[in-house]
């Protein structure tokens, strides 16, 4: 099988052509550094993503708080992470880095606030 990818490991943004079977990458072309090969294998067999979304917040000047996963999570869980976050509401004040949801979907990854919000005056 073949798949075209754009490598996001470094700023070069190489266009990769990946040839693979069910278990192994056979070849990667188009990469200008070794990191492209590693990226291609991970993206084909174990794609991971950082999820950014919002949760409701009460007691602040704005209704939504931006959040993100501390680390990447399996791509197949992204929609479940967003759905889980949409059901959460936090209360101000919140500091950037505060854990909003601990151990998302048993991944060991926390959902954290990406900004600080004080109580509204």
Image: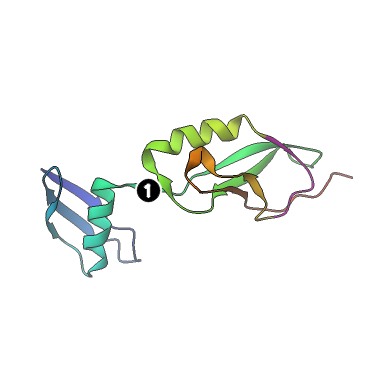
Residue at 64% in and 37% down: 55
Per the image, label 1 sits on a secondary structure element best described as strand
Farthest right residue?
Answer: 121
Residue 103 placement, left or right of 98:
left
What segment carries the magenta color?
A: 89-95
Given residues 53 and 26, the one toward you in this image is 26
Q: According to the image, label 1 marks what residue? A: 48
Quadrant showing the N terminus = top left
Residue at 55% in and 44% down: 103
Residue 17 in picture, x, y percent from top left: 15, 53
Q: Is residue 23 above or below residue 11?
A: above
Residue 105 placement, left or right of 61:
left
Q: Is residue 25 above or below residue 30?
A: above
What count of labels does the image hold?
A: 1
Residue at 43% in and 46% down: 73
Given residues 47 and 107, the one toward you in this image is 107
- Residue 26 on the magenta span: no
């Amino acid at each position: 099988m073949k798949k075209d990818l754009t490598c996001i490991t470094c700023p070069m943004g190489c266009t990769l052509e990946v040839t693979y079977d069910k278990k192994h990458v056979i070849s990667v072309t188009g990469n200008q550094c070794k990191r492209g090969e590693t990226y291609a294998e991970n993206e084909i067999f174990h794609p991971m993503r950082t999820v950014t979304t919002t949760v409701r917040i009460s007691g602040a000047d704005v209704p939504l708080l931006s959040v993100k996963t501390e680390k990447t999570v399996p791509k197949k869980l992204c929609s479940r992470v967003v759905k889980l976050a949409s059901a959460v509401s936090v209360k101000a004040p919140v500091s950037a880095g505060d854990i909003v949801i601990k151990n998302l979907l048993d991944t060991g990854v926390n959902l954290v606030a990406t900004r600080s919000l004080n109580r509204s005056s």
